[in-house]
Image: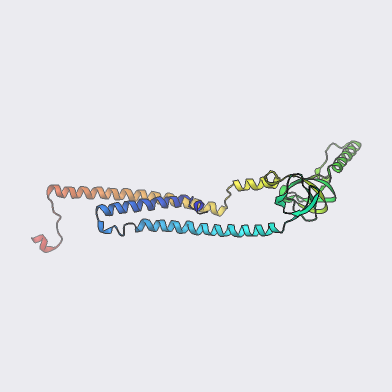
Amino acid sequence: MLWQALDDLMLKLLIVCSIVSITAEMLLAWQSEPCNLAIAWIDGFAIMVAVILVSGVGSYVDYRKEIRFVEKRNASNAVKRVNVCRNGEVKEMHPKLLHVGDIVQITYGMSIPVDGLVISGSQISADESAMTGESDELRKAPQAECMERLEESLKQQRATQKVHGVRKHELPSPILQSGTSIAQGEGTFLCLMVGESSCLGQILAQMEKRDEKTPLQEKLEEMAEDIGKLGTIFAILTFHVLMIRFIFEGLYKKHINLFGVVPMKTTTNAYKK
């Protein structure tokens, strides 16, 4: 997290500026004024301390937030248990330990942890709004019952000469998607997809890959980039002004030494002398 906090354009620029400042001030002090070597590093070191404070505080806050999130997630996961039939034995286990081929008991209000196929049950309906955005509860039934209902619906269409097709809300489905919840009914389903292969696992994997930023973070980054560009422009202008001043002072001193001209003193006694 500290490395991620340092991965910022302004902080990188400040680190480079602090190194350049320390190096330049120490070299100038060593060549011209050795007595100032003890204090020449202070300006650059102050910039480095500011960078360490900003990145350290930001990373510490992110670390504390991550710790609390993990603690809450572990506490919520600790109470999650499902009844599973594996190798002829019925046991209670955590949803993360499910394997393909396990038979899981469906209960009212449970959250489906894996993708599955309903093999038995009655009056089962699922709330798939978390995955599809549809608020209507969808009926679930074993595959044989679903096929029978589909054939009956097609026969009814032929008899009434309707050509609009069958709406999926009118027919039950044997598929249970991970991330959905059971609104009513009970039964069993067969695990088909677990972990990252399930619908919920694929969505979580895509969310981890994407680095989404809030509008406030985007505005702050734009402001930091503008401040950095403005500071760079003023730094370049200051550098050129100082270089011009240094060149003119050097030419002025060279002119004095070349022609033996001594600057006139402002005091009256020195002027008369």
Picture quadrant of residue 164: top right
Question: Residue 273 or 124: which is nearer the viewer?
Answer: 124
Quarter of image, res 74 = bottom right
**In the image, residue 258 lies at what x, y percent?**
14, 47
User: Is residue 136 visible to the viewer in this orientation of the structure?
Assistant: no
Residue lying at the far right in this picture: please name it: 159
Q: Quadrant of the C terminus?
A: bottom left
Q: In the figure, is residue 190 to the left or right of 233?
A: right
Residue pictured at 86% horizontal, 41% vertical: 144
Tell me the residue at 31%/53% (across/down).
26
Q: Nearer the viewer, residue 161 or 250?
A: 250
Position in image of residue 203 (x %, y %)? 66, 46
Q: Whole-percent x and y of residue 217?
A: 54, 53
Q: Nearer the viewer, residue 69 or 180?
A: 69
- In percent of width and height, residue 141 lies at 84, 46
The single residue placed furthest to the left in the displayed view is 273
Between residues 112 and 165, which one lies in front from this camera angle?
Answer: 112
Colouring style: rainbow
Q: Is residue 164 left or right of residue 256?
A: right
